[in-house]
Structures are given as C-alpha cells and as structure tokens.
Amino acid sequence: METELVKGNKQEEIKKNTSKVYFFIIAIAALIVTNVYFYVKFKSSGEKVYALTVEKENLEVEIDRIEAELDKMKIENIQLSPPLIAKEQDARNKIVDLRAKLSRKELSQSDIDYAQSTITSLKSDVAYFTLDVNRLIQENKILAEKNSLLQKEVSASSTKITNLESSNNNLASKVNLAAALKVSNIAVSGLQEKRNNKVEVEERAKRVDKLSINFTIADNTLAKVGNKDVFIRVIDPQGNLIVNHEDNTFYAHGEKLQYTFKHNLEFTNHGEEYSLYWSDDKKFVKGAYTVLLYSDNAIMGRSTVVLK
C-alpha cells in the first residue's frame, strides 16, 4: 500500500516537472517570436529611414545641379528679357521651397515624392529656359558680328571721308593759293614833296619825304574781283620791320605776321596799275628799304629801294 502511494507521488511530481518544462519552452518560444518580430520591425524601420536619407541626398544633389545651371546663365552675362527673368525667379523660388522642406528632420515618403515631382518639373523648366538663353546668346553673337562689320564699314567710310576732306582741304588750299593775287611788276622809289603839291623822285635819304609803291596786279581767272585788303610790310636798312601799332597783324601762309600799313583796293582783274604811298614818322636814313605786299593770305610781291 505504501509502495503504491510512493509511486503515485512520484508520478504526480513528474507531471508537475513536465508542466514546468512545457511552460518554460512556451515562454522561450514566445520570447523568441517577440524578439524576431521587433527585430524585423526595427530592421524594416531602419532600412526605411536609410532609404529616405539616401533619397534626400540624391534630391539635394539634383537641386544643386539645377541651381548650377541657373548660375551658369549669369556667367554668360546675358541681358535677359522680362519673361526669362520671371522664369528664372520662379525656378529659384521653387529651389528655396524644396531646400526648406528637405531640411526638416522627419521626412515622409510623401515629402520625398513631392520633392521628386517638383524636381522633375524644375528640370523641364530649366531645360526650356536654357534653350531660350542659348538662342539669345546666338542672336547676340550674330548681332555682335553684324555690329563689328558695321563698325568696320563705318570706320572705312570715316577714313574715306577724312581722306576726302583732307584732299578737299589740300585742293582748296591749292585753289586759294592759285587764286591769290600776284603782281606782274613792282617798283619802289623815294619821293620829295615840292611846293605847289608837286613831288619828285629822290634818291638822297635826307630829302625823301615818302615812299612810292607802284605795282600792277596780274590777271588771274581764279581770283575773285572786288575789294581786296593789301598788307604792306616795310623793312628798314637795319633789317627791322617798321610797325606803328602792335595790333597790326594778319595771316599769310598759315603764319601770323605784323604789317606796317594796309590798303583796300578795287581788283578788276584787268591788269590795273596801283600806286601806294607811305611816310615814316622818323626821317629816312641811308640804306635799302624793302617793301613786301600781301593779300589773300599770301605774298603778292616785293621790291627794294636804296636811298643814298
């Protein structure tokens, strides 16, 4: 009887131990399943975060490329039209908005999808923008070439005009020089005034009261008839120009000269003879007096008288 009781207790104890083993096995299995679940879950979550991060970096690279394309247009130094300026500003505004969205710490797949869609649209906009700018660059190059050719033509025309003006000036100078009056003969003599308003030719300096300048103007078909100013320069025996007033100046052969006196005469272009008279404030002295006549900015002739 005792033996059966002992057996019964042992069997009961074995059952209890077996139940405990099953419990622990079940608990361990549940723990393993739970760990596997969380492992898979967190692994999936980590991979997702990693994938979003990679996508974000790729999108930022794409944005940098688009912005570089826009900056390249500025390097070309092209004057954009108002519509192109508006396109560029719109693209840059979208880039700023995208960078702000991608800078957030938590990004969802929808954020990434939105960014991808916006970047695709931006690429298309920038592509058309680039085509417009390149077209504008080509047009500017063509205009620059045309302007260069036009400038060369203008420069060549300007050179021709300058040469023509120079030639005309030279021709005008030659014509003016050819049209200048010239004396066919000239004679200077000393005169002494006598009583009864008579004058006689005198060679002795102390008796000379004035000089007589007699000349004939040669015919010149290029010369204009009419009143002519004749400037007379008288050089004394010491080689000094006799000038009564420092303001007595005129131009001849492009040079400013002083004159002793001037006279206005009527030129008829018929070989007229003219007589001019000049007296000095001082007494005449012995030696040679030289008289030079000028008109029309050129010398007409010269002659010398020697007083004894």
Image (cartoon, rainbow, N blue to C red):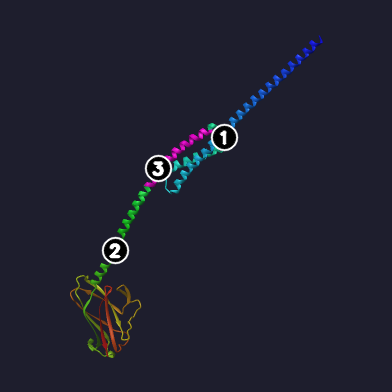
Instruction: Report x, y in % for residue 104.
Output: 57, 37
Q: Are marks 2 and 3 in contact (CB under 8 Å)?
A: no
**For the point 31% across and 61% down, which residue is it?**
159
Secondary structure, magenta segment, majority class: helix
**Would residue 210 be visible to someone looking at this image?**
yes
Instruction: Report x, y in % for residue 101.
Output: 54, 37
Work out which quarter of the rendered image holds the C terminus and state it: bottom left
Residue neighbourhood size for the residue with mark 1, other residues' Cα within 10 Å, grouped as few (<14), some (14–19), many (≥20): few
Q: Earlier in the sequence, mark 2 or mark 3?
A: 3
How far is mark 2 from mark 3, CA to CA? Answer: 46 Å
Toward the left, the furthest residue is: 270
> Which quadrant holds residue 263?
bottom left
Give the labeled residue for mark 1: 50
Q: Which residues are magenta?
A: 111-138
Dot 1: what SS? helix
**Would residue 97 be visible to someone looking at this image?**
no
Give the labeled residue for mark 2: 163
Q: Amino acid at mark 2?
A: Asn
Toward the top, the furthest residue is: 1
Does residue 140 appear to the left or right of 214 in the view shown? right
Q: Earlier in the sequence, mark 3 or mark 1?
A: 1
- Identify the disc placed on residue 276: none
- Residue 288 sits above or below residue 170 on the image: below
Instruction: Report x, y in % for residue 109.
Output: 54, 32
| Between 304 and 126, the one nearer to me in the picture | 126
Give the labeled residue for mark 3: 132
> Which quadrant holds residue 102?
top right
Q: Amino acid at mark 1?
A: Tyr
Determine if the magenta segment contains residue 258: no
Dot 3: what SS? helix
**For the point 44% across and 38% down, which residue is it?**
125
